Image (cartoon, grey):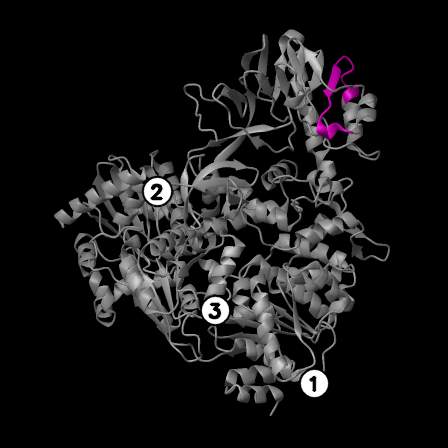
Amino acid sequence: MTRTVDVDFAEATLTLLPERAIWWEAERSLLLADVHLGKDQVFRRHGIAIPDGPTERDLRRIDGLLAQRQVDRLIVLGDLVHAGPRADDRWTHTVATWRQGHPDLAVDVVLGNHDRGTARWLERWDMGAYEALRLGKLDLVHEREDAVGPCLCGHVHPVTKLRDGGHTALRLPVFHFTPDIGTLPAFGAFTGGHVVRPGRKDRTFVIAGEHVVQLGIAGSTSDSD
Amino acid sequence: MTELEQWFAQEGWTPFPFQRDTWRAWAAGESGLVHAPTGTGKTLAAWGGIVTEAAHQAPPPLSYLWITPLRALATDTTRNLNRPLEAIDAPWRVEQRTGDTSSSIRARQRRKPPPALVTTPESLSLLLTYADARERLARVRGVIVDEWHELLGSKRGVQLQLGLARLRAWNPGLRTWGLSATLGNLAEARDALLPAGAGGRLIRGVSPKRVDVDLVLPEDIERFPWAGHLGVRLLPQVLTAIEAARSTLLFTNTRSQAELWFSAIQACAPGWSTAVHLHHGSIDREERDRAEAALADGTARCVVATSSLDLGVDFSPVDQVIQVGSPKGVARLLQRAGRSGHQPGAVSRILCVPTHALEIVEAVAARRSIAAGRIEGRTVPKRCLDVLAQHVVTCALGGGFHAESLRDEARTCDAFRDLTDADWNWVLEYVTSGGTALRGYPEFQRVTRAADGRYVVASRRIATMHRMSVGTITSDAAIAVQWVKGGRLGHVEESFIARLKPGDRFLFSGRTLELVRVRDLVAQVRRARGRTGTVPRWQGGRLPLSTELADAVLDTFVGWDDLAVAHPELGTLAPLIDEQRSRSRLPAPTELLVEHCFSREGFHLFVYPFAGRLVHEGMAALLARRLNRQRPSTFSVTANDYGFELLTNRTDTWVRDEALLREALAPERLLADVRDTLNASEMARRRFREIARIAGLVFQGYPGRGKSTRQVQASSALIFDVLQRFDPDNPFLGQAESEVLEAELEYARLAATLEQLRQRRLVVIDTQRLTPLSFPLWADRVRQTLSTEDWQARVRRALDGLEGAA
């Protein structure tokens, strides 16, 4: 069984999912950040032999999340794509086909730094494009600097390092909450991470396999650096 | 008499027979390898043939290449090669071209190439990427590879093999000569340099210089040695030795030891502390240059160095060489000793400073091996598909290639003489379609096939990216260390800084520093008060004792009583040896000694295969794993160069059972067991950095090179994960695993050791207490689990207890 964690944040109750997404039940909205679709393609165009697959798989993972609950609206907190697609990029068809499979779902994208030049494509895929959104008492942005009040954002791909007892350290994605900024882990399978160092008032939730676990709570290891 | 011989006569020299031999062989169009200790005239042996051949007329552009492993050596080499040309008034000069050469000089060299070029393997590969490479390089008539022993065992050597094969295909008359220090496998070294199966000359330089291995001994030997204990305690004797000589090179095995000794010498040196320098791979280039310059002009009294100074032996000899700690290998000690007594025929002398008592045995064992000419060989890498993939793209850029002829050309290299069609086809597919034969990666493009069937690189962007990535040298990400107010001190590995928190102190570059913050790839520091601190631990610290030296140590135990007469230093160990004999016995090559005893901590099992630290680590983990399968239990494991310890519960005395031990040390199913014991996949993931960079799977670009490349930056670990999930049969993944097994636990040696242990008699002894052999293992484990002060106190107490009982 997977284990999720409910977090109270700016008067909202958010469910942190081990699939690296947030389920906001009151709004029936699913939130993701930093999907970076088509990144493998960009690498291949540069002559770097990355297999075809991550893009397809990320879309299947979204399907998995949609199948488990009644989602009205999917909100992407920036960097839906890795780079503006080219006309002959095959993966754009994969996205279009995926979109056609969810006609009743609203998909809104807060534009991130990688989404420049995608307006045309978002329109074609029937997705809304926004500089920022507001939902409940929360600003939904890509980079935290763009928020006015408490916000949810992406962009930094937060991870933490945990010692596994031996000589190795594991890098695991985290949800990182300061008192007024909640940062989502990167959703995309082909994305790296940036190690965050939580402050004293922060809450950090690590994704360990199929579980979300709060760091620094009794019983869990808390050696994050 | 040739001009060259006249010059020799003017200088008052007589050519050595081996020099004449090499000149004649050169003139006869032969290829080969010249091996001799450093500083005995190898350079002129190889260069003389060319000087004679081209004494009166400048040869056509790029007739000769001189390959040097270290670009820092290029300047000195160029000067040395030009000396005879100047002396005989030849109408041409040698130039150099390395990564350090300015772009204006490179441009001029492109317009008007010099007749002979001093360059590095990487720069040669880069030359091969130009579209007109063939026109320019087809005239190369001779290549000389300096310090071939340094390149031989690495992927750089493989890259050079491929480059030479290319030159040979263009000019079949090409002569190739290698210069090498003394190695245990010289014929193999020659074969790796020359076309497979071609034979070639093996010319031995002046008969080996006499090498004296001396020892600094402490006044009283503690009965029980333990790692690092004698440490800087021998400083007074070392200072006396340094004062008695004009110049001293003090080698340590690790950068942390170098830091310790440097601070200690500097603090105690009377009056000449400014003439003490530090040289290791993490120190800023400028400071290293200063140390090298001080060595060259004779102002340095003492340079404390690591293997960073092992190269470049042809310049700046010193009066005296000191080796701190285990010599680790015979060839290594010889090489270091060769830095002193530089005149042909003079005696090289190296002074060994043991850091624990058994290193006295190692030094004597090394001395005996040198006298008997038993020296380690270097393993020559085979089947490096990452290097081949890079070379294939290089050739596609450098005018293009036909698949079959390039395959056959690669097979003339030693590393690829057994290249299968399957491997070759995969590499070709990898660079053309991404590597999966069945579907290919959509829109992938790197190498494309032109209308005439040649494979070429069509995209300018890919050409630029490849040229920026040519080479096989990778290192752990380097973090710059600099003052908060600016000013750079050098670099440390990322993994070291990651263990420190702001406020922690460490010794670096001879200073005690306090970490302030890490930002991007810069660690900002300030001067710390007081002198205590962590000493950085770098990767270099894990070099294991070589097979040859470990065997020689065992051999020394066998003939102990006779040897103690011939080598009086061993006499100082008498109490320790007596103790070992009375409580247990001395290890022997025909036996595998196993000791066990109880302590408050539990039941200790000590095993002494004498196979080097890495093998012991692997073997200990394997043994623990297999015993655990017999009966679940908890083991804690420690290893050193002589053996390993398994510590378990007091009740688990069953692990000493001989039949069980035999079974658990059997060589069968080794790979499978090692895989699940060591989490080989996770280790391979970290090892993947090198392969990914060489094969062009990660692209680092240049800092400040702009956004065009930022989009395609990803960590090698991430790429490893993606390949593992979406292309699990990718051969690079398998290559990473076999490389990591070899690098982290010397897998081949582990397998050979287990095979050999089968022939040895198992001797299991209940020793009641710790013995001189087991004590260092015990102390190492305690050190790992306690903070520094606790450790010192506890070891001291244990030692007192044992001595009281003895």
Tag 2's secondary structure?
Answer: loop
Dot in front, 3 or 1: 3
Look at the numbered discs 1 and 2 and tell me whether their residues touch, using CB distance below 8 Å. no
Q: Which amino acid type is shown beneath numbered disc 1?
A: His
Q: Which residue lies furthest to the front in this view?
A: B271
Residue B297 marker: 3
Report which residue position mark 1 lands on: B56
Q: What chain does badge 2 belong to? A: B
Tag 3's secondary structure?
Answer: helix
Name which of mark 3 and mark 2 comes first in the sequence.
Answer: 3
Tag 1's secondary structure?
Answer: loop
Residue B635 sits above or below residue A214 on the image = below
Q: Which span of residues is magenta-colored?
A: A99-116
Nearest to the observer: residue A154 or residue B722:
A154
* Total tally of numbered discs in the picture: 3
Residue B728 marker: none
**Location of residue B703 (image quadrant):** top right
Crowding at label 2, few (<14), some or many (≥20) Cα neighbours within 10 Å?
A: few
**Location of residue B797 (image quadrant):** top left
Crowding at label 1, few (<14), some or many (≥20) Cα neighbours within 10 Å?
A: some
Nearest to the observer: residue A187 or residue B624:
A187
